[in-house]
Amino acid sequence: MYWLIDDAELKAAEGFEGVEIEPTESSSGDKCHYDIRNVKDKKAGKFASVSLKKSLFICDKDCKATQVTEEEYSKIGDMYADGVSP
């Protein structure tokens, strides 16, 4: 799963004035991964709950991206709340 994040929108969000976006290979070898740094958890959570719902995607084994539906997004949130990783 990944989010397509508009960096201009992110940098303009309240509490993100000092944000740094850095390409970082993930532990699974994902070379398209970026770390977002210098944001307080509370502000990150607010941005995620408002802005990221519309931009969550899943890649299948053939690297085809599919946007997550509102229903799927809710199920994913429920899984994390229950301590299960999707």
Image: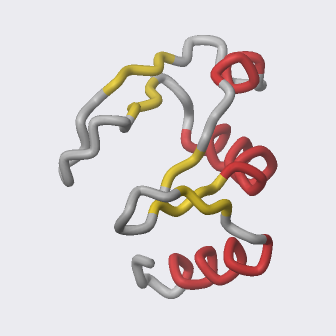
- Image vertical order of residue 82 relative to residue 48, above or below: below
Residue 53 position within the rendered picture, expressed as x and y whole percent measured from the top left: 74, 56
- Image vertical order of residue 46 relative to residue 86, above or below: above
- Image vertical order of residue 49 relative to residue 17, above or below: below
- Image vertical order of residue 58 relative to residue 38, above or below: below
Q: Going 27% across and 45% down the picture, which residue do you hit?
A: 30
Residue 48 position within the rendered picture, expressed as x and y whole percent measured from the top left: 68, 48
Q: From the viewer's side, name the closer residue of 44 and 42.
A: 44
Q: Quadrant of residue 43?
A: top right
Is residue 16 left or right of 22 when viewed as pictured? right
Which quadrant holds the C terminus?
Answer: bottom left
Q: Going 56% across and 34% down the picture, which residue do you hit?
A: 40
Is residue 29 left or right of 34 when viewed as pictured? left
Colouring rule applied to residues? secondary structure
Q: From the viewer's side, name the closer residue of 64 and 74.
A: 64
The mark tally for this picture is 0
Q: From the viewer's side, name the closer residue of 14 and 73.
A: 73
Q: Quadrant of residue 84?
A: bottom left
Q: Going 37% across and 37% down the picture, which residue do you hit?
A: 33
Residue 1 position within the rendered picture, expressed as x and y whole percent measured from the top left: 48, 60
Residue 7 position within the rendered picture, expressed as x and y whole percent measured from the top left: 64, 22
Q: Going 54% across and 29% down the picture, which residue do you hit?
A: 39
